[in-house]
Amino acid sequence: MRIDIITIFPEFFSVLDVSLVGKARQSGLIDLRVHNLRDHTHDRHHSVDDTPYGGGAGMVMKPEPWGDAIDAILSDVQDVPAATDAAPLLIFPSPAGELFTQAMARELAGESNLIFGCGRYEGIDQRVFDHFAVEGRVRLVSLGDYVLNGGEVAVMAMIEAVGRLIPGVVGNPESLVEESHEDGLLEYPSYTKPSAWRGLDVPPVLLSGNHGAIAAWRREQQLERTARVRPDLLPPAN
Ligand code: JEB
């Protein structure tokens, strides 16, 4: 999968050199490129923002650098005809976007080419989304109902969630299926050695060797936890 990121803070993304995504990049499973939006400014001060039409607080990102940065990536992607069938998907993190979920992560993991645009200030001029939606595919996506200062942290979360679903990135595919949200419930609690620690014992059923009893206990824990912490995830009781 090829992933392009446009940002005014390219240094944020140095964390993607490490851990799982870092290994996937080294092995060639993920081709990740970070682009500085300021490289696509043409004025002396490399301006990326201006005051909002209609007034209001803060600044808005100007459309021209975004248009030029995205055009440059799109023509570069078209020059390298990989196994790419569909057009690249443009994703803009936004507090006004649709909610990012595990289901969306699965959809995105099936794409061959993602382009992430990281806004700052009060966001990006609406015409950038409208322009690229005419010919291409554009999605505004929100991490959740809280306010961030820009799209960078949201993009890192999305790349981590999508990256681990790409075949070959996570060592054990079983660990993908067992996890939170893949079956619509929260995870069961996990324990490792020692069996007694600071007066707290591992639940005896886990030491019993009775695999049926262990599976039943884990399912019960999942249901109890989900009902207590995230009742919204349970199917309606009627
Ligand atoms: C994403 C962003 C800003 C109003 C207030 C602040 C670009 N879940 C999320 N919360 N906030 C963002 C997000 C996601 N995804 C987010 C992009 C930008 C916040 N801001 C600051 C914009 N409008 C600028």
Image (spheres, rainbow, N blue to C red):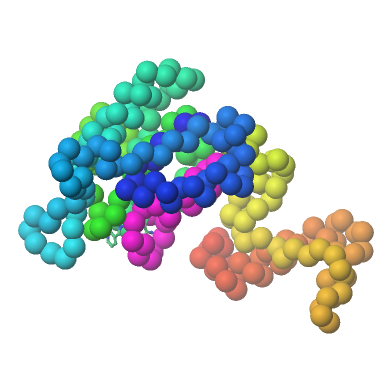
Q: 41 above or below 75?
A: below
- Looking at the picture, how far across and down is residue 121, in whole percent? 25, 58
Residue 162, horizontal then vertical, whole percent? 52, 43
Percent position (x, y) of residue 10? 39, 46
The residue sitting at the right extreme is 209
Compared to residue 215, the image places residue 30 above or below, namely: above
Residue 148 falls left or right of residue 182 = left
* Residue occupying the point 92% across, 64% down: 208
Q: Is residue 130 visible?
A: no
In the image: residue 110, left or right of residue 126: right
Q: Is residue 82 magenta?
A: no
> Which residue reaches farthest bottom?
199
**Ligand 1 in which quarter:** bottom left
Task: Please report the bounds of the magenta region as a residue range.
Answer: 139-163
Q: Nearer the viewer, residue 78 or 232?
A: 78
Which residue is pictured at 18% across the width and 58% down the height?
59
Residue, far left:
54
In the image, what residue occupies the spot 47% across and 36% down?
32
Q: Judge by depth and name the residue closer to the eye, 23 or 221.
A: 23
Q: Is residue 157 magenta?
A: yes
- Residue 158 in percent (x, y) is at 47, 48
Is the residue 93 above or below the residue 58 in the image?
above
